[in-house]
Amino acid sequence: MAVVLYPEVPSIPEGLQQLLDDVSRACFQAEGIDEALFSVRIVDEETIHRLNRKTRKVDRPTDVLSYPEINYPAGKTARDCPRLLKREYDPDSGMVYLGDCVISLPRAQAQAAEYGHSLRRELGYLTAHSAFHLMGYDHMTDEDKAKMREMEKIAMRQVQLWKDDTMTDQRLMELALEARERSYSPYSKFQVGACILTEDGRTFQGCNFENASYGATICAERCAASNAVINGARRFTAIAIVGSAGYAWPCGICRQVLNEFGGGKLRVIVGDPEGQNLQVRSLSELLPESFGPEDLGISL
């Protein structure tokens, strides 16, 4: 456990403890520290308004408040201050206690609706934002803000919660190339990487992994799709695929799986082994007259 969760409002999202643990661990990994812990209070708008007024002299509600245990030297963050971290060692938990985070559930819900993403994503972001405050980051200057935002991106991408509004076909292909490096293909020696782009702007990577029982092999496209689905994604808009030789167009079963979550408009992007000279087809071109959820009266 990386977060001690104190829900003070009814009906918190299911799986919130696991989400906040995953996000906080990604933040600690990005910073290069481990065995750390902080508390997260989930409160109503009245409570966070009162805290904001009392502790910051700001008489209005806000979305998140952070209360660090450590006073970092100017220009330093947690990774630079191992001795300061050791002073906050908590023998009961066996971890370094970084401080407290307070999140307003009503504000998180409103902001998720305003920005067009899930409550899960908003709560994850607010937790990451607070975690980096607790590790010495701030956003008072443009330079500091850029550094903090980059760290937030790294952590949020790690847990598949970052929405990248500037995703290009080439960038998607670069992520597919990165995934290909993790291919497990001792039998065919044919490595494949894939990266799916979802309707809400998230990306999910996959690689092929083979099996001594050849029929148990999983293609990179289905690996990426599984990664997306387990993280709650249901609508795919594009997939980039790259093999270690030639152009790796998806096989028949992968086309059917992609059709389930993208339909005929899904863009399929393939490149040469270097991820260059991209070719793009719609899934309807690769799987004409397809059968999908709509034929069973189901809308994803």
Image (cartoon, rainbow, N blue to C red):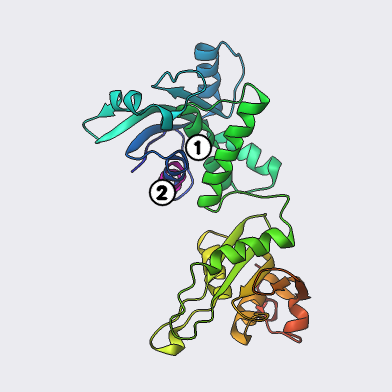
Q: Is residue 174 magenta?
A: no
Find disc 1 in the rendering and name its residue: 127
Q: Is residue 103 above or below residue 205?
A: above
Q: Residue at x 77, y 76 (%)?
A: 281
Q: Residue at x 50, y 82 (%)?
A: 189
- The x, y position of residue 85, in whole percent, is 34, 27
Can residue 195 be seen here? yes
- The x, y position of residue 103, in whole percent, is 51, 31
Q: Nearer the viewer, residue 138 or 17?
A: 138
- The x, y position of residue 246, in whole percent, is 66, 81
Crowding at dot 2, Cα within 10 Å, few <14 / some 14-19 / many 20+, comes out as few
Q: Is residue 23 magenta?
A: yes
Find disc 2 in the rendering and name its residue: 18
Q: Are marks 2 and 1 in contact (CB under 8 Å)?
A: no
- Give the residue type at disc 1: Thr
Q: Nearer the viewer, residue 124 or 60?
A: 124
Circle number at residue 174: none
Q: Main secondary structure of the magenta part?
A: helix
Crowding at dot 1, Cα within 10 Å, few <14 / some 14-19 / many 20+, comes out as many
Q: Nearer the viewer, residue 299 or 278?
A: 278
* Quadrant of the drawing holding the C terminus: bottom right
Mark 2 or mark 1: name the one nearer the start of the chain: 2
- The x, y position of residue 29, in whole percent, is 43, 44
Q: Which residues are magenta?
A: 18-24
User: Horizontally, is 201 left or right of 137 in the view?
Assistant: right
Q: Is residue 52 above or below residue 206?
A: above
Say which quarter of the image contains residue 57: top right
- Mark 1: secondary structure: helix
- Give the residue type at disc 2: Gln
Q: Real-space Cα distance between discs 2 and 1?
A: 12 Å
Q: Residue at x 54, y 34 (%)?
A: 129
